[in-house]
Amino acid sequence: MLAAYFVVAALRPQRGEAAWGPLRRTMLVVVLAAIAAALSPAFGTNVFSPSSLARERARSHLRWKEALAGLNDLPAGSVVASDPVTSYVITAFTPHKVVCTLDQHAPTGDLRGRERTIAARDILSPFTSASDKAHQMAAHGVTHVLVNDELGPLPPLDYWTVSQTSAPLVTARLDELDGLFPEAETIGGLRLYRAGGSTPRHVTTIRNPLLRRSAPPSAAPVGEAAGLAWLEAAGIVASDSVSPGGSIDVTLYWRREDSLPLDKYFVTIRFNSVDVHLPLGGRPFPKVARKLKEAIDGVRYRFRQDHTIVDGFLSPDAWPPGLLVVDRTNVSIPVDVATGRYAVSAKLHTRVTSPNHHVRDFFYDDDVYEGVVIGEITIGRKK
């Protein structure tokens, strides 16, 4: 608005003076240059540029166009069980019903939304038995199960998803149950199973390789409560000095003696520099002092990564009491972190869409995400 005022003022002739004096010309050139500089990004990469449009098309439902066309050929009244994102797309582009839909897009006033989200998870889960799957499919009238391993990177979902890591586990488990899923086919790169085979007469069980009686000797003992669960042991697999932009493998061994209700559970793994020296020792507010030093130095001295356990298929509400749950994840090291030693901590807690932080969380580093220390790594320079 201010720039527009100067342009109009420059173009409007003033009484008793030349229409285009040197001062007015200079002012107009400066203002037009400022406007051009401000608008220049809009003529480069923007939401309408070819590169942005191509990127959006690659992330859209168009990559599943063939699969959606195949779903349209299913009998009328079909009910498809799939992950929340794919289920949301199915309701938008096919006439079929689904068991669940994307977290925040459930129908208004849907009192069973969370229950159906977990039901869809248990139908696809590689860790549920044939009898559990049959029970959930009968309860929700499921006729087909669709496994989508082409979701790609997604923002964190509240409950569960299918990734390229968990999809092979899901399809391998469903392929084993050919009595429950008598037909399977690949449509548009996605795996579609027809339900309706023989239902197990008795409760069946499954051997879950991610459940253990005890931690292996190679894991370092922890033996502390880390949020909502007991962290028995942990292991960190990294070279002696991992570089910024690299990654490390972390394995956690969780346990609970009682069950937890359905909720949005996730694990935070945090890295805190133990070599950083803050002004005044970080007094009186360590977090403020650290962020100020990060701004001055142009590097980070703390970072974290959140994850759900096996994409949410082994969420704490599905843990059998007393057994250890093996939680494996790969943590990416940001490219802008400072080199040096980092203490690694872990914590299990619930996700809140709009977290109500305590005031001290904004001023002190031992905030709501602070967990139990499980080890230490050294981040070195890139070679």
Image: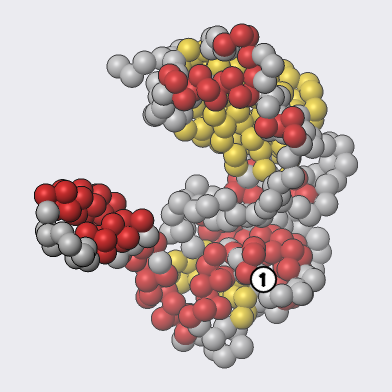
- Screen quadrant of the N terminus: bottom left
Is residue 88 shown to the viewer in this render? yes
Q: Position of residue 280 (x, y in %)?
A: 61, 9
Amino acid beneath label 1: Ala
Q: Position of residue 333 (x, y in %)?
A: 46, 29
76 vs 27, left or right, is right
Camera-side residue of 8 and 231: 8
| Camera sees residue 55 | no
Residue in front for this viewpoint, 218 or 90: 90
- Quarter of the figure that contains the C terminus: top left
Question: Looking at the picture, how far across and down is residue 17, in whole percent?
Answer: 15, 59
Q: Residue at x 68, y 27 (%)?
A: 363
Q: Residue at x 61, y 31 (%)?
A: 269
Choose between 133 and 231: the one closer to the eye: 231
Residue 123 figure quarter: bottom right
How is the structure coloured here? secondary structure
Tell me if residue 303 comes above or below residue 138 in the rendering.
above
Number of marks in picture: 1
Note whether 46 is above or below 346 in the view shown: below
In the picture provided, is 160 more to the left or to the right than 261? Answer: left
Taking the image as shown, residue 160 lies to the left or right of residue 368, namely left
Q: Looking at the image, which residue is at 49% across and 53% down?
A: 154
In terms of secondary structure, where does tag 1 sit? Answer: loop
Residue 237 lies, in percent from the top left, at 52, 22
Residue furthest to the right: 258
Q: Residues within 10 Å of mark 1 (few under 14, many from 20)?
A: some
Residue under numbered circle 1: 106
Residue closer to the observer: 312 or 282: 282
Residue at (71% x, 61% y) in the render: 118
